[in-house]
Amino acid sequence: MSARRLRHAAIAIAAALIPAAGVSASDNPGLDAYMAGDLREATQLWRSACEEDNATGCYHLGVVYRDGEGVKRSNARASELFEKACDLGSGKACFNRSLEAASSGSDPDFTKQIRFLHRGCDLGSMRSCANLAGHYLHGKGLEKNVPAGISLLDASCVSGERSAGSACFTLSAVFDGHGNMVQIEDPVRANHWLNIGCGYVDLDSCTNLGFHYRTGYGVPRDMVRANALYAIACNDGDGLQCPMYSPNEYFGGGSPYEGGNVKARLLPVAGLYSDACDAGLAHGCSALAYAIMRSRSAAASEGQIRSLLDRSVALLPENWFAKWLLNEVETTGLKEWDRRNRFKD
């Protein structure tokens, strides 16, 4: 699958992680065709839907023109389609239209961006709310209003949307004295939002929270928690890509993992996650559960997986990732999970 198709498919996958009530895949036949690999059929279905003033059809057709998938790439046409979809009630189209306005260089006073962000936020697009918050926090196109910015970020962070982690990270920066965005230095509040952001698998949030545990900023210095968070932030994979730290720092201090139900290459991080979970880090518990679920024999460890995820949620009720994994256990079942993931890393 091409990089462009991956970007477009990611929209569908992210949206599908927590399905909206009453919405099924058949409500978007264009997306069904797209995911089946029939780009021509998908484009035609979205075009027809858009001609009938269907916001979803216009939005996806806008993505096609923005990325140049099966059509000649046209930012102007994409902007038109996003704007139409926004007018028809698509919050994510409003967000994309605001990005088009920002990148075009034709909106020096931020008027268009702010208009589309307001509309998107009113329609429930948390990414629109989060970006609008930035305008309030920095006084860009709007009178500077820190409380209004914080309020918007707060609502975005706790929305339960998969993409909310970036809003949590931005909100943490308002209180984090290490950055250049700080408005009110408050390490405890910064760590609170980083904790929730990491629960959305926002890797920047996990990294900064790890740094705070490493340095003792607003929390007791704790290298067990720090190293576990670094490993999560680096996706516990080969060739770790977090440039601030060396691999030895990620894996230092972890006890050997004796469970025998994770892949060999995940044994170092499994030990870290287990230690961090025992120390009371919610993310350590959910990360260990996920490492076991990636073993291709998760069904044999269902009791341990459930226990780890239940503990993670008990430690951090806002932990989106743990709740999503629990939902997979309940709705998909671990035997089916194993079958679906047998060829995946």
Image (spheres, rainbow, N blue to C red):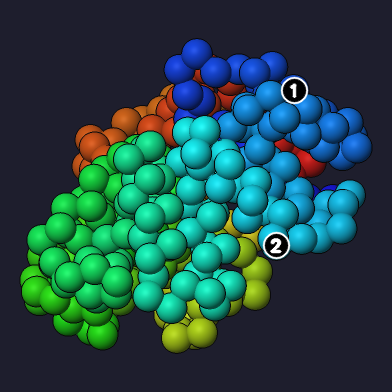
Three-letter residue code for mark 2: Asn
Q: Is residue 26 left or right of residue 228?
A: right
Q: Write down the residue under mark 1.
A: 29
Q: Disc 2 vs disc 1: which is toward the camera? A: 2
Q: Tell which of 335 and 241 is nearer to you.
A: 241
Q: In this view, does 50 lie to the left or right of 126?
A: right
Q: Residue furthest top?
A: 22
Q: Crowdedness of circle 2 by 10 Å Cα count: few (<14), some, many (20+)?
A: some
Q: Position of residue 237 (x, y in %)?
A: 61, 64
Q: Which residue is drawn at 18% across and 66% down?
A: 190
Q: Write down the residue under mark 2.
A: 75
Q: Tell which of 110 and 233 is nearer to you.
A: 110
Q: The residue tagged with tag 1: helix, strand or loop?
A: helix
Q: Quadrant of residue 60?
A: top right
Label located before the other in sequence (2 or 1): 1
Q: Crowdedness of circle 1 by 10 Å Cα count: few (<14), some, many (20+)?
A: some
Q: The residue tagged with tag 2: helix, strand or loop?
A: helix
Question: Does residue 177 lie above or below 18 as drawn?
Answer: below
Real-space CA distance between mark 2 and mark 1, rounded to the nearest whole angstrom: 25 Å
